[in-house]
Amino acid sequence: MRKGVFAGMVLMLAAAQFASTQTRTLRIVTYNIEGDVTQDNVQPTFTNIVTTPGPPLPGLIAPPTNSADVQLGGVLEGIGEENVGPDPAQPIDIVTLEETTSNPTTVAPIDIGLNTFYNSPGMYTNSTYQATESDGDPSDGNGPNAIVYNTKTVQLLASVPVDPAGGTGNLGSSSGEYREVMRYEFSPAGVAPATSNEFYIYVSHYKASTGASNAAKRLGEAQIIRTNEATLLSTARVLYVGDYNVDDNSSEPGYQTILSNASPNGIYQGQGIDPLNVTDNQNIDWSDSTTDTNILVMLTEEDYELRYRDDLQVMTSNVFYGVTGGLQYVPGTYHAFANNASVPYRGSVSTNGDTALNNDLVTNGPVFISAYQNYVDLTGASDHLPVVADYTIPMPAPTVSTLSLAGTNLVFNVANSITGGVFTVLMSTNITLPVTNWTPVLTNIVGSSGNVSITATNVVLPLVPGQFFLLQEK
């Protein structure tokens, strides 16, 4: 994907810059991590088996067969090594979490694991708001929602609880909202927040189980969310993510409320689009045995016995259809991690010939996490599969803030770089030549987000007058 091009820097004789707009790609994940239960899928080789609720289960941030070594990575780091559709591998930017126990017990270790893996203290952190749940009991599937994000690529602007009327005392059967819904507001890191780059993520964990009573409770939570969304700007970019527990399938009222073109109070905004059900087919059965690969590819639970579609990223139409001026979905990137429909109904991603990751992984950290290891990690980390999608967000044009000489080295300091941008330094003694005829003197330098320094070593030749240099980022 072309992300941006800029040029500048004519040494000694002149200085010039030109720029075009660019986007930053964000990898967003929603994941029910079962951090509020004890480990219930134990294999003989797993270490550090969790016997009390709270800590991340083995496999989430380290291999379950060596669960103390976060430098080896786990599922979250594996997601960062996957080429997704048209997008190259990149570390997770945002991961929403369901079934934590608390921020200190469950979420902080995830921050530490990711920061250690990428050898970058402070790269990941979490919202400091501690969400709650009905009856004050964060165990056995009732744990609160949370979020972890990459501070190098996004900034968290607000963490807003979305509670039922009357507040947290009405969490539970009276409202249908059992785990406090969270609304997080983000914009890109390193730039001023604006309506053109802000977006919202609602994180939910709906009531589980089949039957009309439980479906009615899920409807109650969905109505609370859509009513809250109607208080935002009509042009707001919104993701509705989490564990939907859509046990009554695509006709279920709660799911249909999120997909409705109007809020419960009649405001026509915030309609959700499900990337795997764009036409809103209300006759999809996600809960019965099938060989239909169009349904199998949607399933996210359980990873050791795939048979339900519970976990979703639904997005407003301006995000899905790529309306200019804000967050946009990258077509072809939405998927359940490690599910390409090669696993049969009620099969396991670790033992039933899963091929989803066999050709999509690259080294994108200190170690390479193989497809086989990812499959093992998944069945230790949770009984759910994470749902992954890539998005783009507008960024200001990159600029060269300073240019300096250090002996025969030329140093470019660049503002507004993007993660994964590839820099090239070109040189010519004739400024009128087409750029295609300039000579590369530094190539394939991969940048990071924000401000970066790029040094072209030994390129300045004192005895060669009139050297001109061009810096490109693609």
Image (spheres, rainbow, N blue to C red):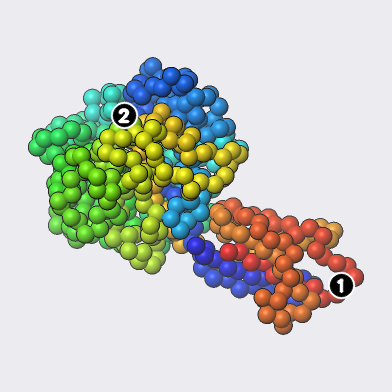
Residue at the (56%, 55%) spot, across then down: 420
> Label 2 vs label 1: CA separation?
67 Å
Q: Position of residue 106 (x, y in %)?
A: 42, 28
Extreme residue toward the top, this view:
51
- Horizontal side of 315 relative to 426 (left or right) equals left
Q: Quadrant of residue 245?
A: top left
- For disc 1, the marked residue is 464
Residue 61's label in the rendered image is: none
Residue at the (58%, 42%) spot, across then down: 365
Q: Position of residue 350 (x, y in %)?
A: 40, 33
- For disc 2, the marked residue is 143
Q: Nearer the viewer, residue 199 or 165?
A: 199
Tell us which disc is closer to us: 2 or 1: 1
Residue at the (43%, 19%) spot, across then down: 44
Whether residue 316 is visible to the viewer of this picture, yes or no, is yes
Residue 341 in the image: above or below residue 51: below
